[in-house]
Image: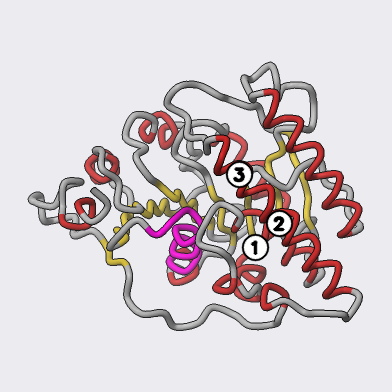
Amino acid sequence: MLSGKKIVVVMPSFNAAATLERTVVEIPRDIVDEIILVDDASSDATVDVARRLGLKVFLHDGNFGYGRNQKTCYREALRLGADIVVMVHPDYQYSPKLIVPMAGMIAYGEYDVVIGSRILGNGALKGGMPLYKYVANRCLTLFQNILMGQKLSEYHTGFRAFASDVLRALPIDSNSDDFVFDNQILAQTVYFGFRIGEISTPTRYFEEASSINFPRSIQYGLGVLATSLSYRLGRMRIKRSKLFQNVTFSELPPYYHPLDMSDKSQNTRSKYAETVE
């Protein structure tokens, strides 16, 4: 705990076996109460590594996407009674050591949401971020800041911390199951008046780190533009998207289950991984 707040780290995972342990080792367990890993039907040994590390694991019954993975992460973190939920990618692209200051900014009441920005400072390109991604990041962020009246350094980082009240209030189930979920939840955070803080985080791009390819990047960029326009139309009371309607988590048909830690026969080559092969 930090300032009496229960902190839960969530890790949306897909084929992260090569980097998961490196990431978990750097998580500050002196303040983190629980670590949840949600596996989106990986075909590698992600679940086996997670079991060995003693994480609380949930398995998707198929490959539903990064956005759906986050929905599961947040739902289960809230069920554990989290006061602060920190999302850390298990690919070691972000530094888990920064969980402490990020959670502290929420625990002591300064912000409701904190993002780890790769753009603050001068480390993005030096850390290996591809030039086209850096340029796209800056252009999309400028566009979104103008339409949303904000001054964030970026909207596209995958390192975030949320107060539990924020996650309960946002219409998260209305968001995409794909990568644009990241952008939509920040737009919702702004729309519903929550405070967003930023902290500079080093950038790590290397072979094992996950990264969407160029075609998926284009699809993501178009989704960001659509989200920004929907936000502006809603503010102007011209058209209110379902992304910005005041509804909370809904009951969904079962699509995932907890890993039975006592059943050593369960592994990543289960029927759930085989559904995506």
Residue reaching furthest top?
A: 126
**Is label 3 in contact with label 2 (beta carbons under 8 Å)?**
no
Mark 3 residue element: loop
At label 1, the amino acid type is: Ala
Q: Which residue is mark 1?
A: 163
Q: Which residue is mark 3?
A: 159
Mark 3 nearby-residue class (10 Å; few <14, some 14–19, many ≥20): many
Q: Is residue 107 visible?
A: no
Q: Residue at x 61, y 55 (%)?
A: 180
| Residue situated in front as seen by the camera: 272 or 99 | 272
At label 3, the amino acid type is: Phe
**Is label 2 in contact with label 1 (beta carbons under 8 Å)?**
yes
User: Residue 94's spot in the image, x, y percent?
Assistant: 57, 33
Q: CA distance from mark 3 to mark 2?
A: 11 Å
Segment tinted magenta in the rendering: 64-76
Q: Earlier in the sequence, mark 3 or mark 2?
A: 2
Mark 2 residue element: strand
Q: Residue at x 72, y 67 (%)?
A: 188
User: Residue 193's spot in the image, x, y percent?
Assistant: 82, 69
Q: Nearer the viewer, mark 3 or mark 2?
A: 3
At label 2, the amino acid type is: Val
Q: Which residue is mark 2?
A: 113
Q: Residue at x 47, y 69 (%)?
A: 75
